[in-house]
Amino acid sequence: MVSADSALPEVVGDAGTSVAGEDLAAGVISVLARPEQRRRAAARARAERYGWPAAVQAFLGIHQALVAGRMRPT
């Protein structure tokens, strides 16, 4: 959920909900009151954990640990 009064609606597109700044609380209540919206929001949040940015960060962490000698290849 993002403020419609910013550039964020362009970023989230149809993956999120845009609300006017003063309607933020009502928007949150609306999402929580609708089980289907709540499930979709939870699914998106979970999917973000496994997207490319998360994979890249995990890979870089392993690579840096190997280079620093804190980890050994198995």
Image (cartoon, rainbow, N blue to C red):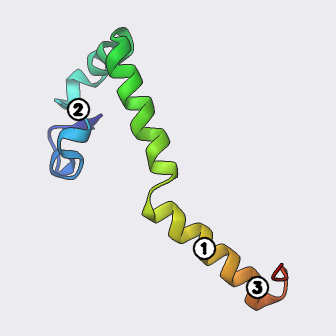
Mark carried by residue 11: none
Q: CB under 8 Å between callouts 3 and 1?
A: no
Q: Residue at x 41, y 23 (%)?
A: 39
In the picture of the structure, the residue carrying the numbered disc 1 is: 59
Q: Secondary structure at mark 1?
A: helix
Q: Earlier in the sequence, mark 3 or mark 2?
A: 2
* Foreground: disc 3 or disc 2: 3
Mark carried by residue 17: 2
Mark carried by residue 66: 3
Q: Secondary structure at mark 3?
A: helix
Give the number of marks.
3
| Residue closest to the eye, 11 or 62 | 62
Q: Residue at x 81, y 82 (%)?
A: 73
Q: Which corner quadrant of the image does residue 69 belong to? A: bottom right
In space, the residues marked 2 and 1 are separated at their CA atoms by 31 Å
Label 1, residues with CA under 10 Å away: few <14, some 14-19, many ≥20: few
| Residue closest to the eye, 72 or 67 | 72
Q: On the picture, is 38 further left or further right than 56?
A: left
Quarter that holds the C terminus: bottom right
Q: Earlier in the sequence, mark 2 or mark 1?
A: 2
The x, y position of residue 9, in whole percent, is: 17, 44
Q: Looking at this view, name the residue that lies furthest to the front.
A: 74
* Foreground: disc 2 or disc 1: 1
